[in-house]
Image (tube, rainbow, N blue to C red):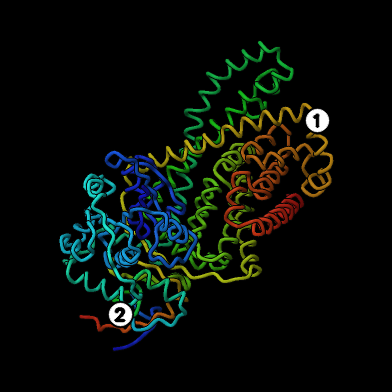
């Protein structure tokens, strides 16, 4: 299993969030949307010119700014192909 | 009895509020539509209940001003209706647990339960009721399903002896609840989801955004022009003009009363744009010049809001908006500003930091012309040639970019990153979209008409007693020297403080050159907010922030006006 930051995930890759390298404020903002260690997410898209990354979590799509996404570490699941 | 509607953003609280109270409030398909609360009343048995539509929040630890409003409201409630989206039970339950810890009687409205079934989500209501210890009523606010049950069960709302928990403990509890109540069956992607994916992917999304924005602009123009040419102009020219000419003849064609009611005659005839009387320009400007564009703008904006496209636009714009110190979501207040700056300034409450709010509000006040002002620019500048309209808009866009860039460097503080939930696409419900259009159109007429008519009376009186000329003489060096406008234009700039559409209208009789008209319109758009915007500006930025914002506006307006005057 490989740990990558959200920006480095390929579109369609998913995994469990392992760590969020941020201050209290950022961790709190993310947790409110259920983005916290242990949550399972799938990356949908990269943004344009370091734009926001879009992910899917619990059937909700969420856009996360590039800098914030860089601090979200994900344990990538092997794709079941 | 005070009943609060609380829940996550974009779960349908405002739609439910309208259902319960019959009071119509603004609803859209994006998180953060409601940034301040609305009140309404409903009958509860034999007593009257007050219902409050609270801005959406994910937690009781607020991250922006709209969420702070929610937290402040919470203490005043006697009963909570926690609106929960059945689509995202897990995330929604976090707030539910926090609310239960407050020990206020509560009932849960499990909204969008039709969508949940469609998405293959099955929720065991009975078990959920047991676990939460409060009534849970499935509702579909948009169709009214379950509303009666909700009302009938309000008296069964109970407060719960839920212990206060830490963040992690709450999530563990939620995981536990979900395991017991929710089953999700796998299903395939629908076309709407495919479209949703395509609209945020850089290339396809960019092309879609471009197509949508261009067709939006063309649609607004087409509809606005159509309404003017096909309806309002014929009404005024064929029906109202003969009446006015009759009255004019009756009043003898001149004199104070004639000037106030009909205005000055041009070549012995009433001129709807230039006469500037109460019954001529006073009605023609709001109804035949501005109203058509208000209707067309808000119809198109309403469709964009209700489909759920705006958050996608915000994502695509994010990296550009960062260059001006904002994040992508600031595009929503900016777009609202093209209708009216007042709701636009209020909508900046969805932004997280003070610095962002200041930049967003200042940029909107300076470089985003409201629909009324734009209608007048189209009407007057457009008559001189389309390229001059392009110059006005190009200048405003350039100022927006350059000023944003400077403010981003100059304003202290930090700008947080974008973090938003993207709602699923929905087909707008015609009734709801038209209802919203009516609210906004009515709002325009109710607010603008008295001010426009009052302004015209005041202008005529001030002309009559010669006060305007005295002021014009004082301001002449700046207006004539720097901006190259005749000193009479000062009166228009002063009236711009009241309403910008009337102010641009006042430029019409001054027989300006095209260059002067362009400079006049640009300066009017930028230099000072209208009185209604000023009031919300003061409330949102505070006195110091407002003063700073004013300083920027005046400086930028004079610089830009001077440069334009020199260049044209």
Q: Residue furthest bottom?
A: A1
Give the vertical position of B83 relative to B148 (above or below). Answer: below
Q: What residue is shown with label 2?
A: A38
- How many marks the image carries: the answer is 2
The chain identifier of the residue carrying mark 1 reads: B
Q: What residue is shown with label 1?
A: B466
Q: Secondary structure at mark 2?
A: loop
Q: Is residue B213 visible?
A: yes
Residue B383: image quadrant is top right
Q: Secondary structure at mark 1?
A: loop
Q: Residue furthest top?
A: B250
Labels 2 and 1 share a subunit: no
Instruction: Give the x, y percent position of residue B62.
Output: 45, 65
Indicate left or right for B101 with B325 as reference: left
**Residue drawn where x is 60% and y is 48% of the image:** B535
- Labels 2 & 1 near each other (Cβ < 8 A): no
Give the vertical position of B141 relative to A24 (above or below). Answer: above
**Residue drawn where x is 56% and y is 36% of the image:** B448
Instruction: Give the x, y percent position of residue B403.
Output: 64, 61
Instruction: Give the x, y percent position of residue B162.
Output: 29, 68
**Residue drawn where x is 40% and y is 65% of the image:** B60
- Mark 1 Cα shell of 10 Å, populated few (<14), some (14-19), many (≥20): few
Instruction: Give the x, y percent position of residue B180.
Output: 17, 70
The chain identifier of the residue carrying mark 2 reads: A
- Which of the pair B162/B349 is nearer the observer? B162
Indicate left or right for B176 with B506 as reference: left
């Amino acid at each position: 299993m490989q740990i990558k930051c959200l920006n480095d995930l390929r579109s369609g890759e998913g995994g469990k969030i392992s760590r969020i390298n941020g201050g209290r404020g950022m961790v709190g903002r993310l947790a409110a949307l259920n983005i916290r260690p242990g949550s399972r997410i799938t990356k949908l898209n990269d943004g344009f010119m370091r734009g926001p990354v879009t992910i899917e979590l619990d059937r909700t799509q969420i856009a996360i700014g590039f800098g914030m996404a860089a601090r979200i570490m994900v344990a990538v699941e092997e794709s079941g192909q | 009895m005070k009943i609060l509607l609380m829940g996550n953003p974009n779960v349908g609280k405002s739609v439910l509020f309208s259902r319960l109270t019959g009071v119509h409030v603004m609803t859209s398909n994006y998180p953060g539509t409601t940034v301040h609360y609305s009140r309404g009343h409903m009958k509860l048995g034999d007593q009257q209940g007050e219902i409050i539509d609270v801005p959406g929040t994910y937690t009781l630890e607020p991250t922006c001003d709209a969420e702070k409003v929610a937290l402040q409201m919470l203490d005043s409630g006697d009963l909570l209706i926690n609106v929960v989206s059945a689509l995202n039970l897990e995330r929604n339950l976090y707030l539910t647990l926090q609310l239960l810890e407050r020990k206020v009687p509560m009932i849960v409205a499990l909204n969008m339960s039709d969508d949940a079934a469609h998405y293959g989500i099955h929720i065991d209501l009975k078990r959920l009721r047991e676990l939460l210890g409060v009534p849970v009523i499935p509702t579909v606010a948009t169709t009214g399903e379950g509303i009666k049950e909700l009302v009938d069960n309000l008296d069964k709302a109970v407060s719960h002896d839920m212990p206060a928990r830490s963040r992690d403990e709450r999530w563990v509890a939620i995981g536990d609840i979900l395991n017991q109540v929710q089953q999700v069956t796998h299903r395939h992607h629908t076309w709407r989801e495919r479209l949703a994916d395509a609209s945020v992917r850089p290339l396809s999304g960019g092309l879609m955004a471009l197509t949508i924005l261009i067709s939006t602009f063309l649609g607004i123009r087409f509809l606005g022009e159509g309404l003017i040419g096909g309806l309002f102009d014929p009404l005024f020219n064929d029906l109202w003009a003969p009446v006015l000419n009759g009255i004019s003849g009756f009043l003898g064609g001149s004199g104070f009363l004639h000037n106030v009611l009909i205005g000055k005659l041009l070549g012995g005839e009433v001129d709807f744009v230039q006469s500037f009387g109460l019954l001529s320009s006073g009605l023609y400007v709001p109804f035949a010049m501005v109203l058509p564009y208000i209707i067309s703008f808000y119809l198109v904006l309403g469709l964009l809001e209700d489909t759920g496209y705006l958050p996608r636009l915000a994502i695509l714009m994010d990296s550009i908006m960062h260059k001006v110190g904002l994040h992508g979501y600031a595009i929503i207040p900016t777009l609202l500003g093209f209708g009216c700056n007042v709701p636009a300034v209020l909508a900046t409450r969805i932004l997280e930091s003070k610095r962002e709010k200041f930049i967003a509000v200042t940029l909107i006040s300076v470089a985003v012309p409201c629909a009324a002002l734009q209608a007048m620019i189209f009407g007057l500048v457009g008559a001189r040639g389309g390229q001059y309209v392009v110059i006005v808009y190009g200048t405003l866009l350039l100022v927006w970019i350059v000023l944003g860039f400077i403010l981003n460097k100059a304003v202290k503080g930090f700008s947080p990153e974008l973090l938003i939930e993207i709602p699923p696409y929905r087909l707008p419900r015609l009734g709801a979209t038209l209802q919203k259009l009516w609210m906004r159109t009515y709002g325009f007429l109710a607010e603008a008409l008295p001010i426009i008519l009052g302004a015209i009376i005041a202008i005529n009186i001030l002309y009559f007693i010669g006060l305007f000329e005295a002021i014009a003489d004082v301001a002449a060096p700046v207006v004539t020297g720097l901006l190259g406008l005749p000193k009479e234009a000062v009166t228009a700039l002063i009236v711009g403080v009241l309403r910008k559409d009337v102010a641009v209208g006042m430029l019409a009789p001054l027989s300006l050159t095209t260059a002067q008209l362009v400079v006049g319109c640009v300066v009017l758009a930028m230099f000072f907010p209208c009185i209604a915007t000023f009031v919300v500006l003061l409330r949102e930025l505070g006195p110091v922030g407002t003063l700073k914002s004013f300083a920027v506006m005046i400086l930028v307006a004079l610089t830009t006006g001077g440069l334009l005057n020199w260049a044209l």
